[in-house]
Image (cartoon, coloured by chain):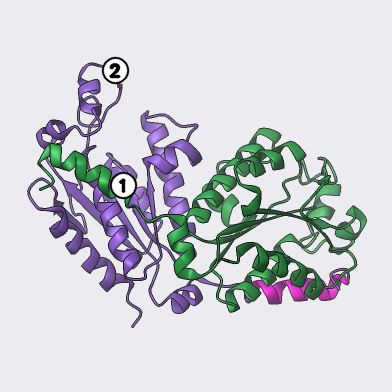
Chain colours: A green, B purple
Amino acid sequence: MLTVSSQQSEANLHWQALSVCRSEREAVQRHKAFIVWFTGLSGSGKSTLANRTEQVLHSAGYRTLILDGDNIRQGLCKDLGFSAPDRSENLRRVAEVSSLLLEAGVVVLAAFVSPYRAERQKVRALFHDRDFLEVYCNCSLAACESRDVKGLYRKARLGEIPLFTGVSDPYEPPEAPDLSIDTENDTIEVCVDIIVRRVRSATEIR
Amino acid sequence: MLTVSSQQSEANLHWQALSVCRSEREAVQRHKAFIVWFTGLSGSGKSTLANRTEQVLHSAGYRTLILDGDNIRQGLCKDLGFSAPDRSENLRRVAEVSSLLLEAGVVVLAAFVSPYRAERQKVRALFHDRDFLEVYCNCSLAACESRDVKGLYRKARLGEIPLFTGVSDPYEPPEAPDLSIDTENDTIEVCVDIIVRRVRSATEIR
């Protein structure tokens, strides 16, 4: 009975100890959970690489989820702007959600400009090294701006977007990323292949 | 090449259209994603039922994750307290995380006191009816208080915990929950069985 308090107390402890844990989920799905964190300027290819990487991994039977501005800024973080404290809180929440997804067994593909080194380090500090891959989408500002797929650089230059990374707010490149991808010169296929290999290796259950 | 801007623009659209979606994940894992929202007083059995339900579902091959105060209040919502606006923001974030987990294909077991009717309705409004089951853990305050598994009611009566639901802050019972579980009189097995049946039925891919 739920109402027998002493039994209930023991029962609770018992059941909570038996809770399903990450390694049990990983064993069932046959791969480890993992976080791939894409950082880089707007237009450097973060979302493109995350999308294509997800397709390849999903087709290979991996459980994946993309976290990016589109699904975070319009939902969980819609109360936040782009000031330094708001960017910090945005990334803190993304990191906490990544942590929950890691517990759920998912390979998280997080694509965020994440321009400040200190903020990226705060994110990283939440995780074991074995669970986390920082991928720097290395592409010059000139190249990103010349693509300007979303027309954001033009707007930023016209002053229509304040605090735009690379134009009116700094981007601090990673000093020692786990992976630096040359998204300026390499094809998407080459970039994705490099990332997928690393994910496969890191998520293998030996 | 990532650098050929007109091609890149088309390629981006193409890839984003091809992004892995919820129904593809559900097809692979052979069950739909779903949200079970447990509401009720502290001590009414929410976490116990969520834990035991997860064990049963996980053993049957379902992808699950529990969201509760333990993993939310210490992480994603550690900046929040228990005032009405903070409770509201807490539940908003939990609902947004549930939405991401739904997209990831997971059966979410969310166990939160969620004492205010209006706040529960805000959560519910984010989801299709077919994706959401509100489970009221129906147990009298007297019974919850007499169990007092965590010793919280005692502390609340002594005034050591302000804004404690049922003691110094109201609990508004659901008027039309999808499921009302008599956690005061029924055994845990009976309660879990009722919930698992509903989840199986709601997550079946026909």
Question: Quarter-wise, where is residue B194 in the image?
Answer: bottom left
Q: Give the range drawn in magenta.
A: B4-16
Q: What residue type is labelled 2?
A: Glu
| Residue B3, above or below B153 | below
Local secondary structure at mark 1: helix
Q: x, y percentage for residue B4?
A: 88, 72
Q: x, y percentage for residue B180?
A: 16, 54
Question: Quarter-wise, where is residue B197 in the image?
Answer: bottom left
For the question of whether residue B39 can be seen, the reply is no
Q: Mark 1 and mark 2, same subunit?
A: no
Local secondary structure at mark 2: loop
Q: Seen from this angle, which residue lies furthest bottom?
A: B206
Marker count (numbered):
2
Q: Name the residue under label 1.
A: A16
Tell me the tag on residue B160.
2
Magenta segment: does it hold B6? yes
**Label 1 marks which chain's residue?**
A
Magenta segment: does it hold A13? no
Quadrant location of the C terminus of chain B in the rendered image:
bottom left
Query: Residue placed at 44% from the left, 69% from the top?
Result: A28
